[in-house]
Amino acid sequence: MEQNTIHNTIQKPLTISINDAGLVTMFFMGDITHDVMEEYKKELDRGVQLIEQYYQAHTRKVRVVLDIQNFTGNYSLDALNALVSFAKKNTPYVDRTASFGGSDKVKMAGEVAIALSMRDNIKIFDTKEEAMTWLG
């Protein structure tokens, strides 16, 4: 029973929020593997809705920042595919996307996701300051 208690206190693999200025913040946490995939995909779907709703209400594209500082780099192929699908669905509504933090392994996975999403408005940075400067 103690293991279940520990498992239930694990943080979400992903949280997405949007502010009034149209800045979408995505926090990636821990491993994104099979055991958290359902929750991960639900949050991505919610993110798609938030972004589209913002665009419809303001007729202005959003900017997205991905905080991958606390992402371990352990992920399933399904997680990568879901992220690519998320990026493709949001293409008409996103001005720019920047990620920051993460190991070289995480950045390499990011480059793969960028290539597969066929978007040229996504960049990877080392620091939050660099990412936010590029987002404008």
Image (spheres, rainbow, N blue to C red):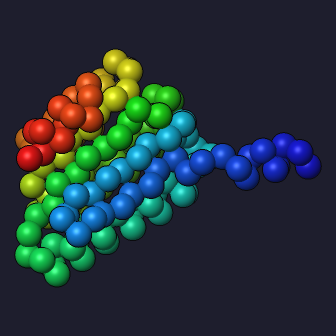
Question: Relative to 110, does residue 95 appear above or below in the rendering?
Answer: below
Question: Relative to 108, does residue 1 appear above or below in the rendering?
Answer: below
- The residue nearer to you, when weighing 13 against 89, is 13
Residue 103, percent from left and from top: 38, 21
Residue furthest toward the top? 104
* Residue 34 relative to residue 79: left or right: right
- The residue nearer to you, when weighing 9 against 4, is 9
* Residue 37 relative to residue 124: left or right: right
Q: Does any portion of residue 119 appear in the rendered image? A: no
Which residue is rendered at x = 26% and y = 29% of the image? 127
Q: Can you tell which quarter of the image residue 69 is in? A: top left
* Residue 74 relative to residue 133: left or right: right
Residue 108, percent from left and from top: 30, 24
- The residue nearer to you, when weighing 113 against 6, is 6
Q: Does any portion of residue 42 appear in the rendered image? A: yes
Residue 73, percent from left and from top: 45, 28
